[in-house]
Image (cartoon, rainbow, N blue to C red):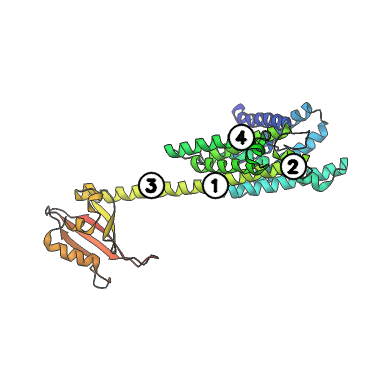
């Protein structure tokens, strides 16, 4: 294998190792909380983005990174290898079975495929690991399975989207952001950081607002606003930032979820995992539908541009006439074809002012008549400047609003 083919797997393995160190540092051993295995998201993202021809090298290097992490933690080699093969191979099988792996990079299809992979890989890997722990160390099966599965599931949901959305194929970030959207996103991001500080740092929320856990919902609101304003990519990175901050506070024994354990009311690990998992899902879903709407808007804009070019090349303009309001909506280069701007021909009287007096009555009757039975398919109309246009129009069926509309095309005829 060439060295350039090993470059990407090496980078992914290095990222796995560094995030593994970070996850171990934020383990929160004192209170048993904060365990979200972020490297699981690296594994899924690498398998998602790399071609299958490089999977073997990638899996070997990821397992080597896991062995290095195990050596730093002074764990037995055979146990580390067993768990490493479990995590990486299960993720590879889950992604290999995903039908949309090579195409879904953003939008609802990406969320569907990612959830399918994340749930399948985390549940299967967690079950195998929990069964092994029960057989070798007499660890209860269900609690171990729950901890392992949620740890990997949240790690995948938090870590995979920001990496996938950074690729050009994802198109999960708007190309241009208006000033208002930029300001809203920036204020929302600052609000998320401030609200996380209030919710996790000491008793400020209880002293000021007289609540213990209600402020933990405020960062989720700010996260949703960041995603709406800045797009799915920014929302995904904001989730990762929220995850790291929350894990750091939890590892230090501070924050609302640790307080629940101190009150013997809950499990800090599970509470934090569910909290971060819901934050990741919320940002994913909001970002997916925002990306989908932006793509639809881009497609409509491109279609309108093509229609306008086609109409201009054939010296035509299209219109829709609302009978009730007597107003026109034009498509095409109205200024070039008719010599007036589209704003100057919005009402019936403005349009009839362009037409020679003998043809004004005919056009008025044509557009305002009650039924389409006697309507001609086309009619020549002479304008005030002496040029001639061919009007092709028909009465459209009534829409849901019950309004009558006429759709047509004006085509400039040769001067002779």
- In the image, farthest residue toward the bottom: 373
The residue that disc 3 covers is 302
- Dot 4, how many residues are within 10 Å of its Cα: few (below 14), some (14-19), or many (20+)? some
Q: Does 364 appear above or below 42?
A: below
**Label 2 to label 1, Cα distance in Å?**
30 Å
Sequence order check, earlier mark of 4 and 2: 4
Q: Position of residue 111 (x, y in %)?
A: 59, 48
The residue that disc 1 covers is 286
Q: Position of residue 410 (x, y in %)?
A: 23, 57
Q: Position of residue 261 (x, y in %)?
A: 77, 41
In the image, taking residue 354 as reference, residue 64 lies left or right, namely right
Question: Quick one: 199 or 220, which is closer to the camera?
Answer: 199
Location of the C terminus (image quadrant): bottom left
Question: Quick one: 325 or 96, which is closer to the camera?
Answer: 325
Q: Which residue is pictured at 78% across the width and 36% down the height?
A: 31
The residue that disc 2 covers is 260
Residue 287: in sight, yes or no? yes
**Mark in the foreground, 4 or 2:** 2
Q: Does 99 appear above or below 4?
A: below
Q: Tag 2's secondary structure?
A: helix
In the image, taking residue 244 as reference, residue 322 lies left or right, namely left
Q: Tag 4's secondary structure?
A: helix
Q: Quadrant of residue 394?
A: bottom left
- Dot 3, how many residues are within 10 Å of its Cα: few (below 14), some (14-19), or many (20+)? few
């Amino acid at each position: 294998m060439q060295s350039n083919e090993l470059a990407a797997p090496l980078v992914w393995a290095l990222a796995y190792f560094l995030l593994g160190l970070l996850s171990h540092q934020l383990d929160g051993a004192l209170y048993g909380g904060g365990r979200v295995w972020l490297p699981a998201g690296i594994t899924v993202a690498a398998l998602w983005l790399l071609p299958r021809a490089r999977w073997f090298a990638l899996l070997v290097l990821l397992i080597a990174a896991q062995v290095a992490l195990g050596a730093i933690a002074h764990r037995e080699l055979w146990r580390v290898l067993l768990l490493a093969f479990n995590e990486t191979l299960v993720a590879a099988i889950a992604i290999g079975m995903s039908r949309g792996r090579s195409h879904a990079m953003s939008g609802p299809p990406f969320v569907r495929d990612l959830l399918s992979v994340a749930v399948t890989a985390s549940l299967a890997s967690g079950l195998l690991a929990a069964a092994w722990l029960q057989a070798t160390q007499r660890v209860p099966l269900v609690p171990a399975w729950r901890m392992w599965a949620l740890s990997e599931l949240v790690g995948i949901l938090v870590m995979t989207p920001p990496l996938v959305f950074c690729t050009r194929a994802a198109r999960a970030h708007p190309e241009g952001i208006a000033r208002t959207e930029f300001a809203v996103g920036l204020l929302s991001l600052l609000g998320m950081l401030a609200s996380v500080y209030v919710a996790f740092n000491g008793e400020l929320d209880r002293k000021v607002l007289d609540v213990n856990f209600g402020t933990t919902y405020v960062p989720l609101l700010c996260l949703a606003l960041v995603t709406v304003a800045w797009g799915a990519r920014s929302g995904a990175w904001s989730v990762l930032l929220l995850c790291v901050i929350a894990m750091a506070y939890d590892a230090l024994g501070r924050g609302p979820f640790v307080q629940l354990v101190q009150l013997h009311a809950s499990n800090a690990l599970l509470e934090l995992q569910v909290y971060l998992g819901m934050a990741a899902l919320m940002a994913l879903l909001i970002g997916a539908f925002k990306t989908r709407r932006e793509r639809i808007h881009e497609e409509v804009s491109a279609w309108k541009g093509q229609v306008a070019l086609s109409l201009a090349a054939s010296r035509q303009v299209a219109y829709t006439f609302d009978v009730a309001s007597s107003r026109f909506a034009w498509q095409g280069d109205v200024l070039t074809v008719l010599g007036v701007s589209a704003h100057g021909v919005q009402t019936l009287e403005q349009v009839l002012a362009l037409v020679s007096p003998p043809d004004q009555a005919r056009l008025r009757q044509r557009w305002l008549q009650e039924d389409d039975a006697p309507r001609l398919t086309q009619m020549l109309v002479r304008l005030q400047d002496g040029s001639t246009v061919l009007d092709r129009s028909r009465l459209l069926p009534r829409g849901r609003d019950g309004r009558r509309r006429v759709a047509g095309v004006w085509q400039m005829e040769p001067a002779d």
